Image (cartoon, grey):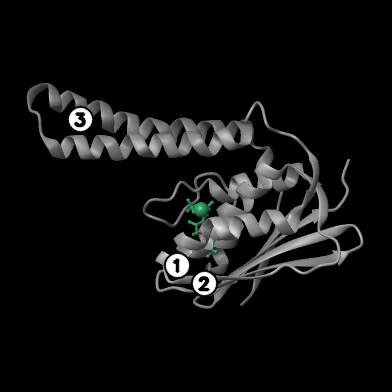
Amino acid sequence: AEEMIRRSDKLSAVGQLAAGVAHEIRNPLTTLRGFIQFLKQDIDKNYIEIMLTELDRINMIVSEFLILSKPQGINYQLIDLKRIVQTIVSLLDTQAKINNVQILSDLDVDHSLITGEPNQLKQVIINLLKNSIEAMPKGGEITVYLKQTDPNALSIVIQDQGIGIPADLIPKLGEPFFTTKEEGTGLGLMVCYKIIENHGGAINISSEPNKGTSVEVSLPINFR
Ligand code: ADP
Ligand code: MG
């Protein structure tokens, strides 16, 4: 069955988000404190490995939030979406190949100029492509294309042949800290939704378990 969702309402729950962040950071901090306590008695290299893993986790969580709140660098301008997508595809191509994933792109549209924040849009494409790569542990193909949906809108579509998303989990996508991955932060999609909402656009995700997932990011060509 195919499920579609369009969402922006969950993003306004700032209080819930703050509680989630506090909780997610407190867990590794509690672990770190416990291990430092042990280290006072007995220097064991295994403790240090666990401590480093927990520190990396805090670092990842904080980094994802920094993307949203970068004080400098939010600079809406006229940008060529085609070039932005090309740049990110070549950036992730090596990582894809290591995972037996091939990224195919078809970016030919008549007009690919839109108003947007280049670094934030790059981040959205990175987060989505990473999810697609991570969804294909045995490899496969990702197709990225641009689509002119109406005179004032342009879409980036990212399709993979990955594990897909069960229908009952679709409503959870974009919720902070929702992850099905051992090492996931569950913040990637939340960041995508927030950035695209700030651009006056929308994200639609459709998925079929064991077949793949398709994410469409639609952006107005002119906004504001
Ligand atoms: P993370 O990647 O850290 O888990 P995200 O917010 O990027 O966090 O994604 C949340 C969850 O959504 C993932 O854990 C996964 O279950 C699901 N998901 C997102 N994109 C895909 C995809 N392309 N294929 C399958 N599942 C996906
Ligand atoms: Mg992710």
Q: In the rendered image of this protein, does residue 37 appear above or below residue 117?
A: above
Mark 3 C-beta to ligand 1 under 8 Å: no
Crowdedness near tag 1: few (<14), some (14–19) or many (≥20) residues, C-alpha within 10 Å: some
Give the percent coordinates (x, y) of residue 31: 27, 33
Q: Earlier in the sequence, mark 1 or mark 2?
A: 1
Separation (CA) of disc 2 from disc 3 = 42 Å
Quadrant of image for the C terminus: top right
Instruction: Tell me the SS state at disc 2.
Output: strand
Q: Which mark is residue 97?
A: 1
Q: Which mark is residue 102?
A: 2
Instruction: Tell me the SS state at disc 3.
Output: helix
**Labels 1 & 2 near each other (Cβ < 8 A):** yes
Q: In the rendered image of this protein, does residue 143 appear above or below residue 220?
A: below
- Residue in the foreground of this view, choosing between 207 and 156: 156
Q: Earlier in the sequence, mark 3 or mark 1?
A: 3
Separation (CA) of disc 1 from disc 2 = 6 Å
- Residue in the foreground of this view, choosing between 201 and 117: 117
Separation (CA) of disc 3 from disc 1 = 38 Å
Check disc 3 and give the amino acid type.
Phe
Q: Residue 107 is drawn in which quadrant?
A: bottom right
Q: Residue 199 is drawn in which quadrant?
A: top right
Q: Which residue is mark 3?
A: 35
Give the percent coordinates (x, y) of residue 121: 68, 48
Crowdedness near tag 3: few (<14), some (14–19) or many (≥20) residues, C-alpha within 10 Å: some
Crowdedness near tag 2: few (<14), some (14–19) or many (≥20) residues, C-alpha within 10 Å: some
Q: Which mark is residue 38?
A: none
Q: Left or right of 131: which side holds 31? A: left
- Residue in the foreground of this view, choosing between 3 and 121: 121
Check disc 1 and give the amino acid type.
Lys
